[in-house]
Image (spheres, rainbow, N blue to C red):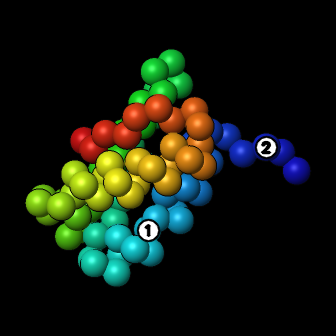
Amino acid sequence: MSELTLKEKIEKALDAIRPQLQMDGGNVEFVAFDEATGELQVRMQGACHGCPMAQMTLQNGISLVVKEQVPEVKAVFAV
């Protein structure tokens, strides 16, 4: 079995977070990952898009989980 690519690892980490976001009518989408800088770009969707708490969700939820599961990710930004 081949090792997962970085994108696949990131998607797997995002999949772990999605159920909580979806319970509140939201979601998160992988946009891009820059291996040189370790910056991950995601797009907040549904109720998360434009929500006043979206930045907190991004930093205290999504970012923590993704960086824990994929050490190559150094920062997470919403676009």
Q: Give the x, y percent position of residue 46.
A: 23, 68
Q: Quadrant of the C terminus?
A: top left
**In front here: 19 or 1?**
19
Helix, strand or loop at mark 1:
helix
Within 10 Å of disc 2 (Cα), the crowding (few <14, some 14-19, many 20+) is few
| Label disc, if present, on residue 59 of the rendered structure | none
- Amino acid type shown at disc 2: Glu
- Residue flagged by tag 1: what amino acid is it? Arg
Q: Quadrant of residue 19?
A: bottom left
Q: Residues within 10 Å of mark 1 (few under 14, many from 20)?
A: some
Q: Position of residue 44 (x, y in %)?
A: 27, 56
Q: Is residue 67 above or below residue 62?
A: above
Label 2 to label 1: alpha-carbon separation? 23 Å
The percent coordinates of residue 68 (x first, y second) are 56, 47
Report the residue at 20% width, 70% height from top. 47
For the residue pair 45 and 72, the one nearer the viewer reads as 72
Q: Quick one: 51 or 7, which is closer to the camera?
A: 51
Question: In the rendered image, which residue does mark 1 sit on?
Answer: 18
The residue lying at 18 percent from left, 61 percent from top is 53
Mark 2 falls on what kind of element? loop
Among the two numbered marks 2 and 1 on one chain, the one whose residue lies closer to the N terminus: 2
On screen, residue 11 versus residue 1, left or right, reads: left
Which residue is disc 2 drawn over? 3
Circles 2 and 1: CB distance less than 8 Å? no
Q: Residue furthest top?
A: 36
